[in-house]
Amino acid sequence: MTDQLALSSNLVFLETPASFVSRVARINFSVPREWSSDLGLRWAKICSAYPDQLRRLSRLTGVSLEQLQFNAPAQIGPCRYRVGHSSATNGTMLRAITRICPQCVLEALEQAGSHGGFQRLDWLVLPIGTCAKHGVPLLKLPNALNTHLTYDVVQQLSVHRDIITQAAQSACVLGRSSFENYLSHRIEFGKHADWLDTLDLTHLHQASLTLGMQLGFGSQLKRSDLSWEQERTAMSLGFSVLEKGGDALASALEQTRQRRPSEERSYFTSDLREFYAWLKSTEDDLATASLRGCVRDFIKQNYPLQGGAKILGAEIRAPEFVTLERVREEHGVGKVRVRGILAHLRGAAVEELSDLQDIRYEDLDKVLQFWANLQNIKQTAAQLHIHPVQVKALIRSKTLEAHRFGTSLQYVTKSSVSALMTRLENLPAAAASKENLPLKDFCRRSQIPSARVISDWVGGKREGLSRDPDASGLAAILVCDGKVFPRRSRRFAGDLALLDAAAHLRMNVASVRHLRDGGYLTQYKVRNPETQHYRCYITESSIRDFEERFITLGQLAEQLDVAAIHLARALDKKEIETIPCDAGFVRAYPKSETEVFQKLT
């Protein structure tokens, strides 16, 4: 058995074997490589923490082998090292650097001289950026010419003594973050018995940093652009969410989703960015399974996916969301209609869902079920054997139920059409005769709109109707000619179609067109969204202006209660001139001739 060295030292808490050998070699007035060779050791293998080298070093120095092995960043896999009770990869833990607390080192140098400086294992872990004792930032010294000289801690501290002294004097006390304390505890004591236990130091580092970046900076900064202070802030922010569990993580991810501008397309890769990219890179790592499962559940519950898509290493069999674009492609229902129907089903305003891009499958089933009970105006008119204009009149009278979904198009419910047809089938059968006129003939003779006859019948205001079994739809209704409906006076308001304008002015449509072309009336066109045809309207303001200055033959005849044809002859005998109109002759007169009109009475 080899005798122990006469000149040795105690192992500082968490001091690495390379740091310990560097100090012992200086105590024995040597350098690490020569001292190791003299005692049958290999300096390079001590730096790499070979087990046989640590055992011999323990026998020579009297230091606990277990403590040397615990403090040694030994390689346990490709680019992976043991760090106390945990492990880390090259991106989180670097062995070949000199990283120290400047105040700890100066205190040691003042107490023990040039061979008192040391390096601790946890100082090599990059996410740990401050000293546990002093709370000041750790200092990374410039590397030496080669790796094994960098491992010589005492030599590095001697060469860079000025840098260390300056750093110690100017250091600001930042204090330890909860994330740094957590990492130190994992190194010293192992797992915390929480949902993060499967993660090693690298997993904790990457998860906290990428999540914190997304929560704190969004897409404003890339990882390569972060300063040390920003990285520390991001890691602390990310860990503060992770340590609270899966529910807190889902809530934080929802916040990132809500921050997305409403005009941008919602997608998880753009909302989670760096955090999702890191998780995707660990798809084959069982250690991140629980973390990936939590994020996968969030994505499934909040984003549109295709069945069978693989998200973070697992196949999504039953996605909960689908895009409105896919709904249009697969079911033929456009975005505006889907939003409108969903707003109707929820009892909300259409504007509240104007930014909706995705829909849950359960909501989509309700929308499609509701849509299947609708038909357009043309289909309804064909089924009822009436004109589309008459269908709209039945809608206005509430005889048929219809809905608009954010557009001018109206859709009639099939149930209301079926109810009307069932009511029609229940009418007694009869044959058309002079007493029982078909609906169309009755309305033409009595000058009553067919929609009013139907709505009064449905509302119980009209009885005695029958049905012609040889006719189809509402055209089969037979009306007893002896029971004539009282006529209602028409009320005109707003901009009027050409027919309505002619009825209001008591003239024919040709005369209305002459007044329009002559500049007396103003017209505009509107496309009917149901028929895609254009319809002309005369503005209310131009009608009002015209009536303030002029009066038509029909209006005058109605006021004087005489026949228009006799009134026209009387006016011609009095040589009352009509208004000048280059577009064509129009029987309209200036109101300045009021005295003449009164004499005519």
Image (cartoon, rainbow, N blue to C red):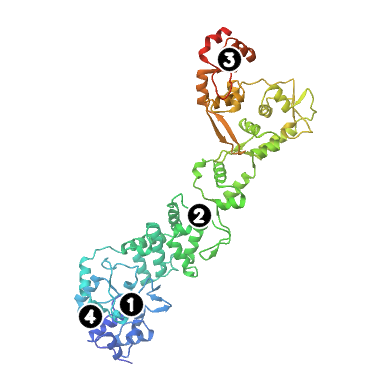
Q: CA distance from mark 3 to mark 1?
A: 108 Å
Which-is-in-front pick, marks 1 and 4?
A: 1
Q: CA distance from mark 2 to mark 3?
A: 69 Å
Residue beneath disc 1: 96
Q: CA distance from mark 2 to mark 4?
A: 60 Å
Residue drawn at the location 56% of the way across and 10% of the way down: 597
Q: CA distance from mark 4 to mark 3?
A: 122 Å
Disc 4, SS: helix
Is 492 on the left-hand or right-hand side of 241?
right
Residue beneath disc 3: 556
Vertical arrangement, residue 135 with respect to residue 487, above or below? below
Q: CA distance from mark 1 to mark 4?
A: 20 Å
Is residue 519 or residue 294 the one in the foreground? 519
Residue beneath disc 2: 302
On the question of residue 601 being in view, the answer is no
Residue 115: which disc? Answer: 4
User: Identity of the amino acid at label 4?
Assistant: His
